Image (spheres, rainbow, N blue to C red):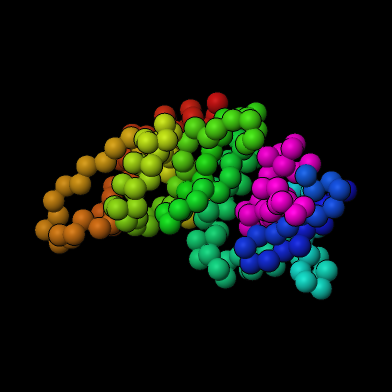
Amino acid sequence: MEIPVLVDENGGIAVGDHAITLHNVGSYGTPERGGGLRLSPYEVLHLKERQKIAPMDKTKRVLSEIELYQLYSKTDPEFSDRYLVYKDLRNRGHVINQGPGSTFFFRLYDKGVKINKGTARYYVRPLREGDSIQIKDLEHLLKAAEQSGKKLVIGLVDALGDVSYLAVKEFVVKPNKVNHGFDTFDDWDWKSKIREMQKEADSTTKK
């Protein structure tokens, strides 16, 4: 049975007697005080792909996966890469939900852990391979992870949509005559970093 979900640009609300099962069984969404279950855009699309929900617009028309993708991409230019990381980790059996804050990241839980009965062990920051990232954002995430007793992982999406994971422990900014502000990772050597950190991060996601 597909659970009805009223969709908006921020995600959707699962309604009906069986909506709460998405949370209790799969750790999807956040229960609303007035009833229903608030789902993120990533949860809506993933559950639609798994044929667990029937996402509907205001006219009660059921939306396709393509229509959901187009809807959420309008408000989030990085939705595609972020969703690929979300989907990959969900398909590996992990519980993952969206983290708050100005710098985007996911909270990643160990396999078998339910959100309401455990705490996340990792912060995951999706990133397109070759794209730059603000040093201040990476520093903020690394500091937030350390203060929360968590590890920071970069979910790196390549041109084919495959995802690799890089465990970030620390970073050191070296002087650059061109970029005096040290604002981005434009010159970041992804290939060498992947070789250095791939083994550790893969062991994390396979636990």
* Residue 12 found in image quarter: bottom right
In percent of width and height, residue 180 lies at: 15, 59
The residue positioned farthest toward the left in the image shown: 177
Q: Residue at x 22, y 42 (%)?
A: 172
Left or right: where does residue 93 sit relative to residue 22? left
Q: Residue 13: in sight, yes or no?
A: yes
Q: Nearer the viewer, residue 69 or 106?
A: 106
Q: Residue at x 78, y 71 (%)?
A: 58
Q: Is residue 16 magenta?
A: no
Q: Residue 194: in sight, yes or no?
A: no
Tell me the quarter of the image containing the C terminus. Answer: top right
Q: Is residue 48 magenta?
A: yes
Label tally: 0
In percent of width and height, residue 194 lies at: 37, 40
* Residue 69 found in image quarter: bottom right
The residue positioned farthest toward the front in the image shown: 33
Left or right: where does residue 190 sit relative to residue 42? left
Q: Residue at x 61, y 47 (%)?
A: 87
Q: Nearer the viewer, residue 70 or 76?
A: 76
Magenta region: 21-49
Q: Residue at x 37, y 36 (%)?
A: 147
* Residue 66 found in image quarter: bottom right
The residue positioned farthest toward the bottom in the image shown: 59
In percent of width and height, residue 22 lies at: 75, 44
In percent of width and height, residue 159 lies at: 48, 55
Left or right: where does residue 116 sit relative to residue 196? right
